[in-house]
């Protein structure tokens, strides 16, 4: 087996350098009085907490969110009073059940707190039952709080741990939110879990020589999707966003630890968490600036890199009047997205303003022009909508999610090499005698999919060969519309 070690990131994740939005979220859950707030406060220290008011069916629930600091670890921590109220009222599937489930879905991990001093209570069992039913995709870590109050000499820590274990979430960590006892144990347990999570979500090259990596593809495409709507002022971004958010909005609020004007919109779409990346910030800035270069996203490469999928919104009426479908700014953005390896979806809005002939012209002109300006990527999805009339909202989200799934695609090495043998014989080589020998083909990373062809001998793959391989790969594995990269490496 060949090694692609040079692509593997062996450095530990530096959490302090990770953008706050990408940090994993840990939910504190448990019946009232187990010490969730105490632990929350210890984790965020004196840093500010953000309180979400989440009106739902006339019931207001407060959810506190803050950035936790535990050694060199950083993560988002959620303390939810809503869950607690539900557990205490016994109506686990009450009016706030949906809201509560959403909070759970926002989380990647949960610390399930019990009180070591009081021992297990019936309500702990209720919370456990609720978690088992709802927290299917979340790793739950058992925490036994107030452990400092136990007398070690009498072995009561063990007894309490035995009880906590009965809840069925494994060995508990004994800690004290009050004194800080056991926080190092919490660190030891969280560190590998959070690190593994970050490896998946941060765009770092990861060694993927593993043959069964295809199995992770499904889970990966379920990770929160970072979506950015960009476009010139007045094309209808806000209108479109509102029509999308209408039914699915969960939380809207300023992000803890970020500048005041950057707002994150987080919502659920068909059970999937979607982060609208810095949308309002861009909208505000783009609205206040005029003239060429007014799309601040062009300057702000970092913002763009944060998005997994970029939805570029065009004004259909302007397209129908102009000689070219895309303005200079729009071309720059579209190209930039592809160069930076983002998924791109083009949205043509205000189609309601166009009568038959113009309508048809726009329908034809935009795809042609997109193909001309981004010849390297075929099949970029283009959706024609009317945000004002609420038409095409579902299509937009459908295309965004399809693009994201393709962007997350992982193909096993075995499958790729079977494919390679077939495709090599399909290509008309320039010089059959000096045909490059591709020994091995593997996907080194997803998000976006990146491949390496290991070539032996003197001849390397020409640009034409690489284009052929890229095109074939996209066609055969349905990866149209996303930037797929093939690198080549020589091996003896
Ligand atoms: P919550 O309802 O789960 O958020 O619980 P709180 O954080 O409000 O704590 C409930 C009570 O337990 C308060 O009186 C806290 O002072 C106390 N408490 C919290 N953590 C500890 C701990 O580690 N040891 C002890 N002895 N008491 C604690
Ligand atoms: P933004 O600056 O891109 O956020 O654009 P807005 O959402 O504020 O929309 C700018 C103007 O275009 C507003 O007057 C909207 O009512 C209008 N508009 C937005 N979408 C549509 C649409 O689909 N059809 C029509 N006719 N007007 C639209």
Image: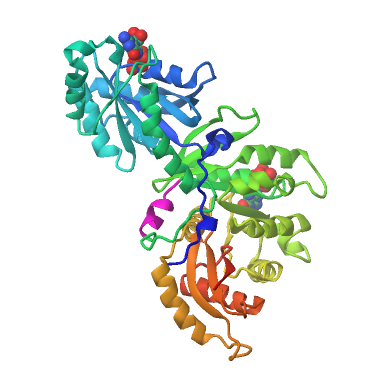
Residue drawn where x is 48% and y is 43% of the image: 198
Which residue lies most toward the front here? 492
Give the main secondary structure, helix, strand or loop, of the magenta stretch.
helix
Ligand 1 found in image quarter: top left
Residue drawn where x is 24% and y is 17% of the image: 116
Color style of the picture: rainbow
Q: Is residue 170 left or right of residue 404?
A: left
State the image quarter where residue 27 is shown: top left
Q: Position of residue 65 (x, y in %)?
A: 47, 26
Closest to the observer, 15 or 32: 15
Q: Is residue 257 left or right of residue 320?
A: left
Closest to the observer, 49 or 17: 17
| Segment tinted magenta in the rendering | 215-223
Q: Is residue 216 magenta?
A: yes
State the image quarter where residue 179 is shown: top left
Above or below, 227 relative to 157: below
Above or below, 414 relative to 62: below
Closest to the observer, 384 or 106: 106
């Amino acid at each position: 087996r060949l090694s692609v070690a040079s692509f593997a990131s062996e450095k530990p994740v530096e959490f302090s350098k990770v953008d706050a939005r990408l940090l994993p979220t840990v939910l504190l859950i448990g019946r009232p009085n187990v010490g969730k707030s105490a632990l929350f406060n210890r984790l965020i220290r004196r840093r500010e907490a953000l309180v979400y008011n989440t009106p739902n069916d006339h019931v207001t629930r407060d959810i506190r969110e803050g950035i936790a600091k535990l050694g060199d670890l950083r993560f988002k921590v959620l303390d939810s009073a809503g869950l607690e109220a539900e557990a205490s009222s016994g109506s686990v599937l009450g009016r706030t059940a949906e809201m509560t489930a959403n909070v759970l879905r926002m989380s990647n991990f949960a610390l399930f707190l019990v009180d070591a001093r009081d021992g297990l209570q019936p309500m702990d069992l209720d919370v456990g039952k609720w978690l088992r039913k709802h927290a299917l995709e979340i790793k739950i870590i058992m925490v036994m709080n107030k452990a400092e109050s136990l007398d070690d000499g009498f072995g009561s820590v063990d007894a309490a741990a035995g009880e906590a274990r009965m809840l069925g979430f494994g060995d508990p960590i004994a800690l004290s939110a009050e004194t800080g006892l056991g926080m190092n144990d919490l660190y030891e347990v969280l560190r590998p879990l959070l690190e593994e999570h970050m490896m998946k979500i941060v765009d770092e090259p990861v060694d993927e020589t593993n043959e069964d990596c295809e199995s992770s593809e499904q889970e990966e495409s379920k990770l929160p999707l970072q979506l950015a709507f960009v476009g010139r002022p007045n094309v209808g971004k806000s209108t479109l966003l509102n029509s999308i958010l209408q039914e699915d909005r969960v939380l809207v609020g300023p992000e803890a630890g970020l500048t005041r004007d950057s707002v994150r919109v987080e919502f659920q779409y068909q059970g999937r968490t979607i982060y609208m990346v810095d949308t309002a910030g861009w909208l505000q800035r783009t609205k206040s600036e005029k003239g060429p270069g007014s799309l601040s996203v062009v300057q702000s490469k970092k913002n763009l890199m944060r998005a997994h999928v970029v939805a570029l919104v065009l004004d259909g009426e302007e397209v129908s009047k102009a000689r070219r479908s895309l303005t200079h700014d729009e071309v720059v953005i579209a190209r930039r997205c592809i160069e930076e390896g983002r998924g791109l979806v083009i949205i043509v809005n205000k189609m309601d303003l166009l009568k038959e002939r113009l309508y048809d012209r726009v329908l034809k002109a935009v795809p042609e022009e997109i193909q001309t300006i981004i010849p390297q990527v075929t099949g970029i999805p283009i959706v024609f909508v009317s945000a004002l009339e609420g038409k095409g909202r579902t299509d937009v989200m459908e295309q965004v999610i399809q693009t994201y799934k393709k962007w997350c695609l992982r193909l096993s090495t075995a499958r790729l090499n079977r494919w390679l043998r077939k495709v090599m014989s399909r290509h008309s080589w320039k010089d059959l005698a000096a045909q490059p020998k591709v020994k091995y083909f593997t996907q080194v990373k997803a998000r976006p999919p990146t491949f390496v062809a290991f070539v032996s001998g003197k001849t390397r793959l020409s640009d034409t060969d690489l284009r052929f391989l890229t095109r074939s790969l996209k066609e055969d594995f349905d990866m149209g519309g996303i930037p797929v990269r093939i690198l080549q490496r020589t091996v003896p």
